[in-house]
Image (cartoon, helix red, strand yellow):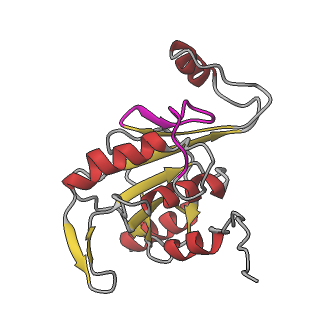
C-alpha cells in the first residue's frame, strides 16, 4: 500500500538564524562629536570607555528617537501633522531619521511589502532598507570576505540612539543591515562620555 505524504506547511523559527547573523556584525562604541551635521538632539547613553569619533567621509548617521506615551514634543507632533500623520497619545513613539529624512516610524505605509526575515509580517522598515541598498551601499568601499566567499561593504554606519530607547528598535536596524543586497557589518554606536571621566582627564592635562 502506497504511503501518502501529508501536505503540511511547516513554519520555521528564524530567531536562532537571526541571532547568528548578528555575530557577523562588528560594533564600535564611540564618543560622538555633536559638531557634526545632520545630528538630532539626543541624550546619548554614557560609556565608561569608548573610542573617540573620527568619522570616515560620507559615513551614514542614523538618529533613533524614542518618546514614551504622551511624551512626544509638540515640535515633533507638529512636524508629523504637516505630513498628514497623527501620533497617538497613548502609545510610545520612535522614528529613524537620516539627514532630516524619516526612514521609519510606527505603522508607516508598507506599500504591501513583507519582512524578508519574519515571513508574512509587514515590512515597516522597507524605506530604511531601500536607502541602505540603493544609496549607501553603492558608495561604500568593499572587501572580499574569505569565509563567506563574497564581497561585502567595508564602511561603517553610525547609530545614534536616545539613552532610553528600547533595544528592540536598535535590533531592527541590525536585522536590516543583514538583508540580502545590504550586509553592512560595521556598525558604530554613539555614546557620550561620563562627565567625571572628562573632568579627571582635563585635570590631568593641567598638571
Q: Which residue is farthest front?
A: 1
Along the horizontal axis of the image, is 200 left or right of 139? right
How many numbered marks appear?
A: 0
Q: Quadrant of the C terminus?
A: bottom left
In magenta segment, residue 149: no
Nearer to the camera, 95 or 12: 12
| Residue 34 visible in the shown view | no
Query: The N terminus is located in which quarter?
Result: bottom right
Give the overall secondary structure of the magenta segment. Answer: loop
Q: Position of residue 67 (x, y in %)?
A: 67, 38
Indicate whether 124 appears above or below 174: above
Judged from this view, the residue extending furthest toward the right is 90
Q: Where is residue 101 shown, x and y percent of the image? A: 40, 32
Residue 51 found in image quarter: bottom left
Viewer-proximal residue among 6 and 100: 6
Please name the residue shown 50% across and 32% down the image. Answer: 111
- Please give left or right for residue 45 compared with residue 176 in the image: right
Where in the figure is residue 91, as x and y percent of width and height?
A: 76, 34
Pick whichever, 80 or 142, lies toward us. 142
Left or right, 63 with respect to 143, comes to right
Residue at position x 37%, y 64% from top? Answer: 183
State whether residue 36 appears in this view. Answer: yes
Seen from the viewer's position, the closer of residues 173 and 3 is: 3
Magenta run includes residue 106: yes
> Which residue is at a point 43% across and 44% down the rendered structure image?
128
What residue is drawn where x is 80% and y is 29%?
Answer: 90
Q: In this picture, which residue range is highlighted in magenta?
A: 99-115
Residue 96 location, x and y as percent? 50, 41
Q: Is residue 124 above or below residue 147?
A: above
Amino acid at each position: 500500500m502506497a504511503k501518502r505524504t501529508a501536505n503540511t506547511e511547516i513554519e520555521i523559527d528564524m530567531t536562532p538564524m537571526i541571532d547568528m547573523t548578528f555575530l557577523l556584525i562588528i560594533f564600535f562604541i564611540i564618543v560622538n562629536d555633536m559638531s557634526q551635521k545632520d545630528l538630532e538632539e539626543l541624550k546619548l547613553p554614557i560609556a565608561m570607555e569608548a573610542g573617540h569619533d573620527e568619522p570616515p567621509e560620507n559615513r551614514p548617521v542614523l538618529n533613533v528617537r524614542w518618546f514614551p506615551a504622551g511624551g512626544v514634543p509638540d515640535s515633533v507632533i507638529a512636524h508629523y501633522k504637516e505630513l498628514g500623520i497623527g501620533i497617538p497619545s497613548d502609545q510610545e513613539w520612535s522614528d529613524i531619521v537620516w539627514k532630516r529624512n524619516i526612514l521609519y516610524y510606527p505603522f508607516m505605509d508598507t506599500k504591501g511589502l513583507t519582512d524578508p526575515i519574519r515571513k508574512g509580517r509587514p515590512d515597516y522598515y522597507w524605506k530604511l532598507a531601500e536607502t541602505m541598498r540603493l544609496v549607501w551601499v553603492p558608495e561604500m568601499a568593499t572587501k572580499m570576505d574569505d569565509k563567506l566567499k563574497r564581497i561585502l561593504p567595508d564602511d561603517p554606519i553610525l547609530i545614534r540612539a536616545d539613552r532610553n530607547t528600547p533595544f528592540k528598535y536598535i535590533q531592527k536596524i541590525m536585522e536590516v543591515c543583514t538583508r540580502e543586497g545590504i550586509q553592512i557589518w560595521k556598525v558604530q554606536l554613539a555614546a557620550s562620555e561620563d562627565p567625571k571621566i572628562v573632568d579627571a582627564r582635563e585635570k590631568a592635562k593641567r598638571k
